[in-house]
Image (cartoon, helix red, strand yellow):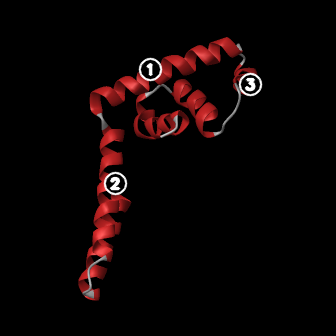
Amino acid sequence: MPKKLDFVMLLDCYGDLLTEHQRNVMELYYCDDLSLSEISTPLGITRQAVADLIKRTENILLDYENKLGFVHRFILLRDCFGKLNEYADKINDQQLKSAISHQLNVGLNLL
């Protein structure tokens, strides 16, 4: 998975644990794809301050993931549901196949 997507997932999972300022800057950088100067100018801080904040916050997010592992588990569950869906497609009984597919979709939506 590309590094940018990693941090978007980490931010989605653990963003509420960050300060509002940290979360705002990370969303501007990773989700809105703004440059350091595009972030720093309206906030009235230097590009270096933005870069430092991003680096510190990345480390915080990685630490949360190392301790809690929610993103890793999410990826494993999503893959598991995908495999189960592939197996369900091989079932000949349409009623059973439909019921299993429905339950798999319910489970995927919960993720």
The residue lying at 28 percent from left, 65 percent from top is 84
Disc 1 to disc 2, how far (Cα)?
26 Å
Q: Please give left or right for residue 51 compared with residue 65 in the image.
A: right
Q: Position of residue 80 (x, y in %)?
A: 29, 56
Residue 93 lies, with reference to residue 64, above or below; the image says: below
The residue lying at 45 percent from left, 27 percent from top is 18
| Secondary structure of the residue carrying numbered label 3 | helix
| Secondary structure of the residue carrying numbered label 1 | helix
Q: Position of residue 75 (x, y in %)?
A: 36, 47
* Quadrant in the picture for the C terminus: bottom left
Which residue type does callout 3 highlight?
Pro
The residue lying toward the viewer, choosing from 38 and 81, is 81
Labels 3, 2: front one: 2
**Disc 3 designates what residue?**
42
Tell me if mark 2 has few (under 14), some (14-19) or many (20+) residues whose alpha carbon lies within 10 angstroms of its own: few
The residue lying at 71 percent from left, 13 percent from top is 46
Tell me if mark 3 has few (under 14), some (14-19) or many (20+) residues whose alpha carbon lies within 10 angstroms of its own: few
- Contact, CB < 8 Å: mark 1 with mark 2? no
Q: Position of residue 85 (x, y in %)?
A: 32, 68
Q: Give the mark nearest the N terminus, 1 or 2.
A: 1
Q: Position of residue 8 (x, y in %)?
A: 51, 38
Q: Give the mark nearest the N terminus, 1 or 3.
A: 3
Labels 1, 2: front one: 2
Q: Disc number at residue 79? A: 2
- Contact, CB < 8 Å: mark 3 with mark 2? no
Residue 46 lies, with reference to residue 80, above or below; the image says: above
Which residue type does callout 1 highlight?
Asn
The residue lying at 34 percent from left, 46 percent from top is 74
Residue 41 lies, with reference to residue 33, above or below; the image says: above
Labels 1, 3: front one: 1
Q: Disc number at residue 59? A: 1
